[in-house]
Amino acid sequence: MTATAAARGGLGVADRARVAAILFCFALVPVAAALMHRAFAPILLTIGAVAATRAAFWSHDLAGFFGRPAWRTPLTIAAVAALVFVALIAARGAPGLALVAAAPIGASVAAVAYLRAVPAAAAGLARAFCVAVAAAVILLTIEYLTDGWLRAATPPTDETPGRWKDFVALARGVTAAAPCLFPAVAAGAAFLSGRQRRRLLAFGALAALLIPAAAFGVFSNVVALAAGALAACAALKAPRTTITVLTVGFVVATLAAPAAVFIPAEALNAAHGATWPASWTQRLFVWNAAAEAAVRCLPFGCGPDYARAMAAAGATVSVEAAAIALPVMPTHPHNVFLQIWLELGAPGAAAFAAALAAGGLALRRAAPSPVVAAGIVGSAAFALASFSLEASLWQAWRSSAFGLAAIGNCLSYLVNRRVNTMRG
């Protein structure tokens, strides 16, 4: 490193260009949340591509990891399990879907490796990440309070009855932005004094409770935000225990998903269908149908994207609270764990559970500070709820949202570590 680079914060010309590109991507986050939620995928992939231009990522990070793998370490096990999961998708004749699953993971890995390699850039990037997430929350809240004024003023015009497409898109913007809230609050706390930090943490918890007001009628967003807020608060008191409980929750949700075959959907519809929201009752039939098909296709599953084939068959069910018959299977089962069993079977579920278990163990052994852990488990708890109630395996914008949250958590770790070192 030259003296000039050192004088400019430890970054050379190439790294300053990379950081500028990442800052630009962060600036797009609030726009994407309010106007184009699918843009979360290209935002993350661009950050990953920029990070991957660092030669050391290929010659040192990846070459060192795969050339001399420490097979007994949880992080290595998690990486291998993730690779096996992607390979299973490709082996079932769906290389495109394998890329959909792998690209956000690869981009996140490259971005995190880069941030750890250039700690001098962490403070500026962390501030920018916090501002971007705050701006996203503000824009989404404004859209809620003004009945989507910004989307109405921005072409194209939504001609659907009641502008339902606009409001569905805004709800998905909440889904995409919300996981980033928790690391943004944790990162922001690093720049404040003790009293200010407590106030920010309190504000973050309040924001997590207020955002559901902008959830635009999507109950799963409300549940996921509440789960994230509760997990984050628990991590402030007992970080390692909270990480363990959440890891167990992910593994159990994965392995036990086929138990949905026992959901008495017909009986519950008869007893409560007239009083429950129609979407709730429909979801019971969806999960029941997905589980039944998954059991029929054991042990290897029915094949990638089988849920879409089920949807194309057009089977419907009569729900008491609905005026028309509803699909037994939408384009996906609204449960990632069930979708894995349905389409990839026991091998896919085993690889997914192994990656989650090993990742959780690696995180527990890393022993992050309570504030950093709060950001991590807040995002993870949001993911657990979203995976259980709403998400699909093949929607890149959803997995990319969690990739951006991983970047935020890495920045939170770096800036909080620096602060803790200085104060120690």
Image (cartoon, grey):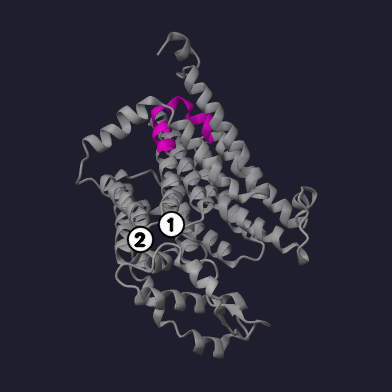
Point out residue 291 in the picture as x, y percentages from the top left corner: 41, 75
Report the front residue among 311 and 377: 311
Residue 197, compared with residue 119, is above or below; it is: below
State the image coordinates of residue 408 (x, y, percent, origin top left). 49, 41
Q: Give residue 282's quadrant in the image.
A: bottom right
Residue 119 is situated, as x and y percent measured from the top left of the image, at 43, 28
Residue under label 1: 234
Mark 2 / mark 1, whichever is N-terminal: 1
Residue 308, x across and y down, in percent: 50, 67
Lateral position of residue 92 relative to residue 33, left or right: left
In the image, residue 124 lies in the stretch drawn in magenta:
yes
Quarter of the N terminus within the rendering:
top left
Amino acid, disc 2: Val
- Sort mark 1 into few (<14), some (14-19) or many (20+) by Cα contacts within 10 Å: many
The secondary structure type at the circle numbered 2 is helix
Which disc number belongs to residue 245? 2
**For the magenta stretch, what is the residue range?**
110-126
